[in-house]
Image (cartoon, helix red, strand yellow):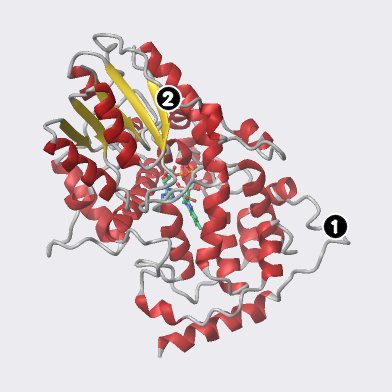
Amino acid sequence: TPSLVWYRDDLRVADNPALTAAIAHGGPVVALYVLDEESDEGRALGGAAKWWLHKSLESLTADLADLQVPLVLRRGPAEAVVTGLVEELSVDAVFWNRRYGAERHIDERIKSALREADIEATSFPGFLLNEPWDIQTGAGTPYSVYTPFWRATLDRISHHPIPEPLSVPERAAARAEAVDGDDLSDWDLLPTSPDWAGEIAERWTPGEDAAHERLAEFADTELRDYLHGRNHLDVDETSRLSPRLRWGELSPRQVWHAVSPATHRTEAARSFRSELGWRDFAWHSLYVRPDLHENNWRADFDAFPWPPLDEDALEAWKRGRTGVALVDAGMNELWRTGTMHNRVRMVVASFLTKNLLIDWRIGEKWFWDTLVDADAASNPFNWQWVAGSGADAAPYFRVFNPELQRSKFDGNGGYVNRWAPDADAPDAPEPIVDLKESRRRALDAYQSIRG
Ligand code: FAD
């Protein structure tokens, strides 16, 4: 009888506790990926994410084949698909790495159903540095402020070091018999007409091998300049690992150990590790509030007087036609390459929610559809951070000034030149809002909910 490893956001063979356990279990191993667009829990993937998923599944299929593990693709509600396949193959054990958003309730139901049927069902940590329930305040509640959260994380790590990553397991003991599944191409994850993914494909090579190459390269070179690079838009010296972590081509443990406190003692390395900490913090927040993309973290924000949606302004923002150079450059970079520099993400989000007074949820949705690293926790968490509705958010009165940001962080103009080359032409369009006046309007709106 085969065992089953159920793949989700962990598209890798190295440091994959579920895969390692399935192979150690003995006998043939079948891997499964379910495209679930039907369950109530969770969120359907956006366009750029689907592109990445397609490419990464191709790469995973080949890597698993080397281990004598076929990857079966099936589409439908996860609960029915997983339990159906277990029955079909008379599987005796199922392994997976945990999820922490609303989907975890699907996993809980499947686990009880399997155990009731006397089938082994085991889940593992593999997506975060620490499990959400392991980092809590003295009172046993989750942290809502980052600094104490990170202090508690480092303290825990000093007592419970981040485990060494697992290496790629040996081949499965036996080859599983062929199992029916979908063809990846039937899932229509890639765009056809128009094919908007050309520049995304130039910029990115999904898959575990490329992820490791990038991690090694970053740790060896750009990390040295990270403090400078992360704030200078044109040099782009950040790690670019976010989609790798989002899709689990790399585990945070692998990244941690590549830039670990034991080997990398610089300020730059500390700062990079603390960014990984923000990822955990966002996920711990989603664990507490699985509705993070729908509801304000802070209830007082529910009364925020968003004006009726200005569709034209929204369209101008999405298309990079606001007439504000740095905003347009960022939105073009996003549309064309599926990513955007972190600082520019903050600037365009502030511009949408404050200068245009458009609800953060609308911007979050656009990012969800266009980012290759679109992440169920980090995306809404950061939008709420910028909008001011989040737990440990930027103070509302901190409205980013895109012109000041441009002169401070794109001093020699490289970034704007690259992504919005016409921004400074004499016939460039005027900004669609007056920055000063719209800032005033936002602050007034905020005053109205402060009571
Ligand atoms: P590096 O600077 O090299 O950081 C290393 C890793 O730390 C990143 O790969 C990422 O996993 C994590 N990280 C860094 N900054 C943050 C942060 N602020 N919050 C959470 N994790 C962080 N990041 C996503 O992964 N997915 C998203 O959907 C996403 N949406 C965002 C939306 C807005 C409005 C903003 C302001 C930020 C968003 N971020 C998101 C966070 C951040 O912009 C990206 O993680 C970062 O730009 C990725 O580039 P990098 O891998 O080179 O980061």
Q: Is residue 301 above or below residue 104?
A: below
Q: Dot 1 lies on which element?
A: loop
Q: Is residue 449 above or below residue 432?
A: below
Q: Is residue 34 above or below residue 72?
A: below
Q: Residues within 10 Å of mark 2 (few under 14, many from 20)?
A: few
Left or right, 394 with reference to 145: right
Q: How many numbered tags mark residues here?
A: 2
Q: Residues within 10 Å of mark 1 (few under 14, many from 20)?
A: few
Q: Is mark 1 within 8 Å of ligand 1?
A: no
Q: Is residue 384 above or below residue 250?
A: below
The picture places residue 217, in percent across and down from the top left corner, at 48, 27
Residue 144 can be seen in this image: yes
At a point 57% along the width and 32% down the height, the residue shown is 204
Task: Look at mark 1 in the image and give the residue it sits on.
Answer: 425
Q: Dot 2 lies on which element?
A: loop
Left or right, 253 with reference to 429: left
The picture places residue 427, in percent across and down from the top left corner, at 88, 61
Left or right, 119 with reference to 255: left
Residue 209 can be seen in this image: no
Disc 1 marks a residue whose amino acid type is Ala
| Quarter the C terminus occupies | bottom left
Q: Distance between the Cα atoms at labels 2 and 1?
A: 54 Å
Disc 2 marks a residue whose amino acid type is Gly
Residue contact at pointers 2 and 1, CB within 8 angstroms: no
At a point 49% along the width and 46% down the height, the residue shown is 45
Left or right, 128 with reference to 54: left
In this view, the residue farthest toward the bottom is 451
At a point 30% along the width and 9% down the height, the residue shown is 175
Q: Is mark 2 within 8 Å of ligand 1?
A: no
Task: Look at mark 2 in the image and give the residue it sits on.
Answer: 181
